Image (cartoon, rainbow, N blue to C red):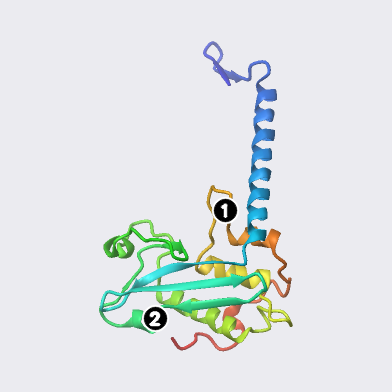
Amino acid sequence: MVYNATNNSVFAPKGYNDLSNERLVEDAKRKIKKRKAKMEYAKTIDSFGGKRFLGLTPKGNRVFASYTVYKDGNLKIDFTHNLSVLLQEGSMFAGQRYTYKHNEKIYDTDEQLTRKISHQRGEVTVRTLYWLQRLKNLADAKNYKGFDKKKKVTKFFLSKVAHAIYVGGGTGDTEISYADLYRAWDFPEYDPYFNPETVYSYPDEL
C-alpha cells in the first residue's frame, strides 16, 4: 500500500490486488499440500497420543495423564499416580499447560513446570483432576456415550480427551494432531453433544 501525504490518503498501486490474491492462492495451496501430507502419514501409523504434566507429589515426583488411541478405535487413558495425591499437603499443580509426545524428553525443570505466571494458560486445578478422572472412567467402561456398539471411540469423545491431555501438531509432515486422524482413520459419529459430567453423578472419587 502507498501513503499520499498530500491528502492523507492510502491507495493500492497497480497490480497490488493481483499480487495479494496470488499470495493468498499460493498460501492456500501450501496449506492443502501440508494437510494432505499429514493425512498420508497418519494413514501409516497404528496409534497416536501423548501426555500432560499435572503436578508434583509431596515427594517431588512428576504426575502425568496420558492417552493412546489406536487405529482399531480403542482408546486408553492412564495416570502415573492416583490423582488424589495432588490434593495432599505439599503437592504442587502445574503452573500452566505442558504437553508432550510419548517418550519425548522433557527439559523443563520442576520449578518451571510449577511456576505461577500472571497470564495463566491451562493451569491445573482441582476441577482439572475431576475432569480427567471422569474421562478415564468413561474410557475404561467404554461408555456408550463415547463409544459405538463395536467399542470404537467416537470423534467427539476423542476430541474431549485430546483437548484435556494432548492435541499434538507441529510444522513437520509427521507432526500430526488428533484432527489429522479424523481425515485418515475411520471414527464413528455419535451423540456429539453429550456432556461427560452429566452421564452420571459428578464428580468421581479421585
Residue 102 image point, x, y percent: 47, 66
Q: Secondary structure at mark 2?
A: loop
- The number of numbered discs placed on residues in the rendered structure image is 2
Q: Quadrant of the C terminus?
A: bottom left
Q: In the image as oriented, which residue stretches furthest toward the front?
A: 44
Mark 2 or mark 1, which is nearer to you?
Answer: 1
Nearer-N-terminus badge (2/1) = 2
Tell me the residue at 66%/75% (across/down). Answer: 153
Residue 29 vs 90, above or below: the answer is above
Front-lying residue, 92 or 125? 92
* Residue where numbered disc 1 is placed: 174
Contact, CB < 8 Å: mark 2 with mark 1?
no
User: Residue 108, position in %: x, y?
Assistant: 33, 59
19 lies above or below 106: above
For marks 2 and 1, give the CA distance: 30 Å
* Depth check, front residue: 111 or 107: 107
Residue 105 quadrant: bottom left
- Which residue in the protein does label 2 denote? 81
